[in-house]
Amino acid sequence: MTNSRQKGAAFERDIVKRLNGFAAKHQLNFTCKRNLDQYQARDLCDIQIPGHAIECKAYKDGFWFRTDWWEQVVRASDGRIPVLVWKFNNKPIRVTLPLYAIARDLPEDPDRTCVVLLEEWFNILRENWTTYGAGEDPRAPEGD
């Protein structure tokens, strides 16, 4: 039986590697790493990229994300866009994010979410990167 903490850490490392490769390929000027402080304090996300707080979950069985996972990343987001990256064994990696992360003119409401595959989230990041402020407040008005 696989230790669940080891499985979670391995999944986080995989997501960090994919994010860093994606950022380098598209010249998004960020690198990320696992937030090891998450094991010492509550309400910290697993990974941070500019304007985003990312929580990763990897489980053996299931089909859909749990509400408490989403609530956890929303609490940890601290003004950033909450992102839940999750998977079950032998299933594709999925990403839950608020609709305002895609449609930037929508009100900031973390209860209105969508689920996309990891590759589609990367496309969303690439297409919306400049609207996220690239390290600034992701919801700051343009031109101020």
Image (cartoon, rainbow, N blue to C red):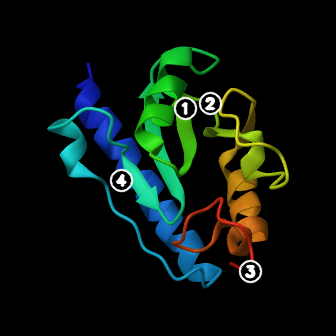
Q: Which residue is mark 3?
A: 143
Q: Position of residue 108 (x, y in %)?
A: 70, 42
Residue with the mark numbered 1: 87
Name which residue type carries label 1: Lys
CB atoms at circles 3 and 1 under 8 Å apart?
no
Count of numbered labels shown in the rendering: 4
Q: Could you tell me how far apart the alpha carbons at marks 2 and 3 are, in whole angstroms? A: 42 Å
- Residue 72 shown left or right of residue 119 in the figure: left
* Residue picked out by circle 4: 13
Percent x, y for residue 120? 75, 52
Front: mark 2 or 4 = 4
Crowding near the residue tagged with mark 2, few <14, some 14–19, many ≥20 C-alpha atoms within 10 Å: few
Residue 66 visible in the shown view: no
Mark toward the start of the polypeptide (3 vs 1): 1
Q: Secondary structure at mark 4?
A: helix
- Which tag, 4 or 1, sits closer to the chain's start? 4
Q: CA distance from mark 4 to mark 3?
A: 36 Å
In front here: 34 or 41?
41
Q: Which residue is mark 2?
A: 91
Select label 1 or label 2 by which is in front. Answer: 1
| Residue at figure coordinates x 68%, y 78% from the top left | 144
Q: Residue placed at 19% from the left, 37% from the top?
A: 39
Residue 130 in sight: yes
Badge 1 vs badge 2, beta-carbon distance below 8 Å = yes
